[in-house]
Structures are given as structure tokens and as C-alpha cells.
Image: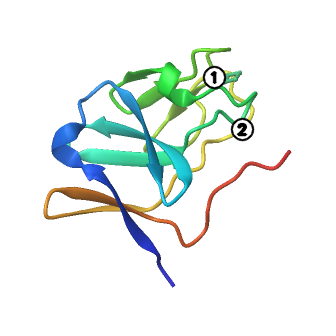
Amino acid sequence: MSVWKEVCAVGDLEDNAVTEHEVGGVKVAVTRAGEEYFVYPLFCPHMDEPLSNGFCDGATVTCSFHMWQWDMRTGETTGEAEVDLLRYPVKVEAGVLHADFETVLAYED
Ligand code: FES
């Protein structure tokens, strides 16, 4: 069963930025690429650097620590990342971005 929770107003999000949010005690990062929105675990799957310290170019996000990079549309690496990025299902209703927290996403150690 889906567990949709409000993340933020889409009007608060800018292109080419990674922002940090806490939703029900879960820390997530959010990226906007035009009218596409991506919500994913805040901490890098490599060595836990907050991805809000990273860079965003369109739908490509880069961790600032060792430059692992992903295509947010697929979660797949576009560089040397050894782990794909996990992403939450999202939807926009009445100008508010929601993510489905039915499963809190976490990387295996
Ligand atoms: S901590 Fe993100 S690439 Fe190493």
C-alpha cells in the first residue's frame, strides 16, 4: 500500500539544484529538471556524503566527494558510480511534490 507524504511545494524548487528535506524523519534529496521531480535518499551510496552538497545539471546529479554521477531519470550511473541511485515514486498534486514512502529506501552495506 502506498504511503504518500508531502515533500515540498514545487514552486520552491529550482532547476540545477539539489536540496535537502526531511519527511517524517527520513532525510531525502530533491532535484527538479523542468517539470520532472526526483526524490531520493540524502546520503550518497558510496560514503554517505550528503548529495545536497553535490551538483546538478538537468537530470544528472553528481556527488561532490568522489564525483559519482547518476541520471535521475533511470537512477543509473553515467560515470564511475558502482551503485545505482535509489529513487522514490513521486507525484505532484495541487503544486505540492509527494513521494511514496511505503518503503524507506536504503543501500546495502
Ligand atoms: S561519497 Fe559520494 S562519490 Fe564518494
Picture quadrant of residue 96: bottom left
Residue 37 in the image: above or below residue 51:
below
**Residue identifier under label 1:** 68
The Cα atoms of the two marked residues, 1 and 2, are separated by 9 Å
Q: Which of 43 and 82 is in front in this view?
A: 43
Describe residue 104's horizontal placement relative to residue 106 as left or right. Answer: left
Q: Is residue 25 above or below residue 1?
A: above
* Residue tagged 2: 83
Q: The C terminus appears in which quarter of the rendering?
A: top right
In depth, the one of 94 and 90 nearer the eye is 94
> Is the residue indicated by label 2 positioned so its CB lies within 8 Å of ligand 1?
no
Residue that appears at 57% across and 15% down: 64
Mark 1 close to ligand 1, CB under 8 Å: yes
Asked if labels 2 and 1 touch by Cβ distance under 8 angstroms, the answer is yes
Q: Which amino acid does label 1 sit on?
A: Trp
Q: Which of marks 1 and 2 is nearer the N terminus?
A: 1
Q: Where is residue 98 in the image (x, y as percent from the top left)?
A: 34, 61
Along the line of sight, which residue is nearer the eye, 103 or 62?
Answer: 103
Q: Quadrant of residue 14?
A: top left
Q: In this view, does 98 lie to the left or right of 70?
A: left
Q: Residue at x 75, y 32 (%)?
A: 82
Quadrant for ligand 1? top right
